[in-house]
């Protein structure tokens, strides 16, 4: 996969970035730098193309997910995360997955459906993809989710289904609601920053 890597400064957070539909590996870099100025960054470009837009898995229309593509791309992404982390000497448990929209959805799926040493996720405007195959405990996971009350893409039901999937399996869950839609709002990014800085290193 195409990716951008920046080792950042010693003692800073390590942020693994996954963009929304139509973005690329640069899309979340400014937000990452706001979240933590000296952060290490590993940022991927989704390999699925939809009308010229990059995504992390296929869909057949709005919120009609291609689940075979989702599973394949989740495995592919995880292999890439492992490969690059080993190459750069970053323990998997150091990463904070930071995703927006489509990128948040595949990252949440990775944490819910694959047993991995990844433990931290900061997900802007994610939704349930409706897959709940695995039941292993998520007590080691620290998860932050945001939801826009006026979001035309993510329904309250779909957001709540995702939150419940983390909560019922023991994840340490923080939820930030905004009055806005699918876009990032300043107050949620500020709250994400505060949450990130209270995480143990
Ligand atoms: C998705 O397809 O993952 C969600 O609908 C979010 C989006 O990319 O719009």
Image: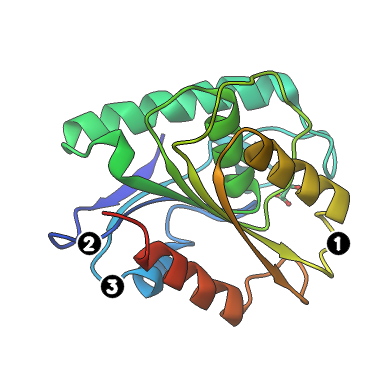
The quadrant where residue 13 appears? bottom left
Q: Residue furthest left?
A: 10
Q: Earlier in the sequence, mark 2 or mark 3?
A: 2
Q: Which residue is mark 1?
A: 152
- In this view, the residue in front, 161 or 6, is 161
Decide if residue 61 is on the left or right side of residue 199: right
Residue 21 is at least partly visible in this image: yes
Query: Which structural element holds mark 2?
Result: loop
Q: Within 8 Å of ligand 1, the CB of disc 3?
A: no
Decide if residue 142 is on the left or right side of residue 152: left
Query: Alpha-carbon neighbours of circle 2 within 10 Å: few (<14), some, or many (≥20)?
Result: some
Measuring from the top left, give residue 198's x and y in whole percent: 37, 65
Query: Alpha-carbon neighbours of circle 3 within 10 Å: few (<14), some, or many (≥20)?
Result: some
Q: Tag on residue 125? A: none
Q: Which residue is mark 2?
A: 12
Q: Is the C terminus in the top left, top right, bottom left or bottom right quadrant?
A: bottom left
> In whole angstroms, how far apart are the C-alphas of marks 1 and 2?
35 Å
Q: Which residue is mark 3?
A: 37
Q: Earlier in the sequence, mark 1 or mark 2?
A: 2
The structure residue drawn at horizontal position 84% and vertical position 35%, both measured from the top left corner, is: 64
The structure residue drawn at horizontal position 21% and vertical position 39%, both measured from the top left corner, is: 90
Query: Which structural element holds mark 1?
Result: loop
């Amino acid at each position: 996969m195409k990716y951008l890597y920046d080792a950042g400064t010693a003692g800073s957070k390590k942020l693994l970035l996954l963009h929304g539909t139509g973005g690329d590996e640069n899309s979340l870099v400014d937000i990452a730098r706001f979240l933590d100025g000296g952060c290490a960054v590993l940022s991927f470009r989704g390999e699925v193309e939809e009308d010229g837009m990059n995504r992390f898995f296929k869909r057949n229309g709005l919120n009609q997910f291609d689940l075979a593509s989702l599973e394949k791309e989740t495995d592919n992404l995880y292999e890439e995360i492992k490969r690059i982390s080993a190459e750069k000497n970053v323990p998997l448990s150091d990463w904070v997955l930071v995703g927006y929209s489509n990128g948040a959805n595949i990252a949440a799926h990775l944490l819910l459906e694959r047993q991995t040493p990844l433990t931290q996720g900061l997900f802007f405007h994610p939704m349930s993809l409706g897959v709940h195959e695995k039941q292993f405990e998520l007590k080691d996971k620290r998860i932050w989710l945001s939801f826009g009350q006026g979001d035309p893409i993510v329904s309250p039901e779909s957001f709540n289904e995702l939150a419940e999937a983390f909560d019922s399996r023991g994840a340490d869950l923080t939820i930030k609601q905004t009055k806005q839609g699918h876009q990032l709002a300043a107050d949620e990014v500020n709250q994400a920053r505060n949450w990130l800085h209270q995480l143990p290193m």
